[in-house]
Image (cartoon, helix red, strand yellow):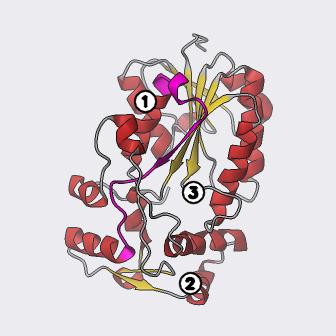
Amino acid sequence: MSTGPELIAVTGASGRLGGRVARRLAAAGVAQRLVVRDPARAPQLPAATVARAAFGEPEAARAALTGVATVLMVSAAEAPDRVAQHTAFIDAAAAAGVEHLVYISFYGAAPDCTFTLGRDHAATERHLQGSGLRYTVLRDNLYADFLPALVGPGDVIRGPAADGHVAVVAQDDIADAAVTVLREPAPHAGVTYSLTGPEAPTLHDVAALLAETTGRPITYRPETVAEAYASRAVHGAPGWQVDAWVSTYTAIAAGELAAVTDDVPALTGRPATSFAELLRRGGPAYPAE
């Protein structure tokens, strides 16, 4: 493994967001270490080595991060113990001598935010602040790329979002912003950015754009909270996961995801991508893994 002083580690490199970042760094000729749970799924990129480690494996994570100057920590998959996984990884990064950690968080993360998983991110941020590491937090709004997956049976988006607005952000914009920070982290130390698109559509707007693009009669039908829980009960998911699904919509209804920022253009030097533009470019689908 390379142990150059400028080495960057990217977690989640086999996923959508981490993979985007890794490919951008590779295209720029940046040496990087891809930290993944399954090396067989890691992308093969120039100037990149692969290390196997999961967030909840402190010894493996410490070994994987030894010699790394800066690390991108893409938050772990949703799980009841996600905060414990995150804190273990942050501690491993500090023990390995990492200088700067860039954490992918969620827009409006707070101990009492409506979106239940946003509370996990708030707890992770608090731990990071006390870790002794230099850090930067990228709080992403809902992924614009994910919106087509909200369309359910009958070409209807259902959820208790009322007429709330959501400043969805494209994953390519997040990746570009992350690369800016990773390549020159010092100016961003201690800074929290809130990454959004250039506008905040309602789900009525989202449905209309999807209908226009696909030619399907896609609509948005607001649910009550009780209806939302009932309609999702058929999936047999654990309670914490259903809470997360429903609170995605109630956070929109509460206005907690509506404010647009200029952090994407400030970091990337170009305008943020609207949902309409993402659809015009094609390929926004978010298939199941």
Instruction: Give the secondary structure at mark 1.
Output: helix
Do callouts 1 and 3 mark residues in contact (Cβ within 8 Å)? no
State left or right for residue 48 relative to residue 286.
right
Mark 2 vs mark 3, foreground winner is 3
Query: Residue beneath label 1, please?
Result: 180
Do callouts 2 and 3 mark residues in contact (Cβ within 8 Å)? no
Mark 2 vs mark 1, foreground winner is 1
Identified at 66% across, 68% down, the residue is 241
Q: Sequence order check: which comes first, mark 1 or mark 3?
A: 3
Mark linked to residue 228: 2
Give the magenta range.
182-203
Instruction: Give the secondary structure at mark 2.
Output: helix
- Kind of residue at disc 1: Thr
- Kind of residue at disc 2: Ala
Instruction: Give the secondary structure at mark 3.
Output: loop
Q: Is residue 187 magenta?
A: yes
- Kind of residue at disc 3: Gly
User: How many C-alpha atoms fall within 10 Å of the one at disc 3: few (<14), some, or many (≥20)?
Assistant: many
